[in-house]
Amino acid sequence: MAGTEVVVIHAGLQLVCWAFLLPFSLYIVRSKLHKDWTLHHRNLNLAIVIGVLGAVLTIVIAHLTESSQ
């Protein structure tokens, strides 16, 4: 994978997590509009963690494949 493509994937995952999912998760906590708000908040936070790990792993795997070539 080219370096630019990896950075775009990494940046996209980080952008979705930090600019959309995290504020939405905080909104759910503050508004408590649904009776299962804790379940939705937990699931969103899990999605954020998975997204951030995916973004970090994208860079790590790209770095390791470049080093082995």
Image (cartoon, grey):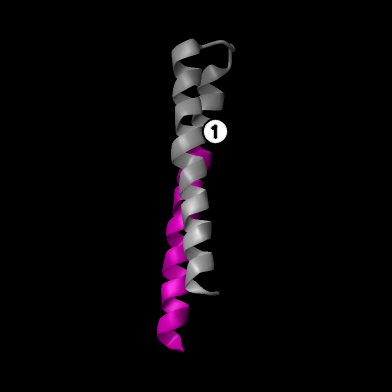
Whether residue 58 is in magenta: the answer is yes
Q: Main secondary structure of the magenta part?
A: helix
Count all numbered tags in the image, as a single digit. Answer: 1
Work out whether residue 2 or residue 48 is closer to the camera in this orientation and state it. 2
Q: From this view, report whether residue 36 is shown above or below residue 59.
A: above
Quadrant that contains the N terminus: bottom right
* Residue 64 image offset from top left, x and y in percent: 42, 77
Residue 37: quarter of image = top right
Residue shown at the point (50%, 55%) measured from the top left: 54
Q: Say whether residue 2 is magenta.
A: no
In this view, which residue lies farthest toward the front?
4
Q: Is residue 19 above or below residue 54?
A: above
In the picture provided, is 40 more to the left or to the right than 14? right
Residue at (40%, 83%) from the top-left corner? 67
The residue wearing badge 1 is 43
Point out the stretch of residues depicted in magenta: 45-69
Secondary structure of the residue carrying numbered label 1 = helix
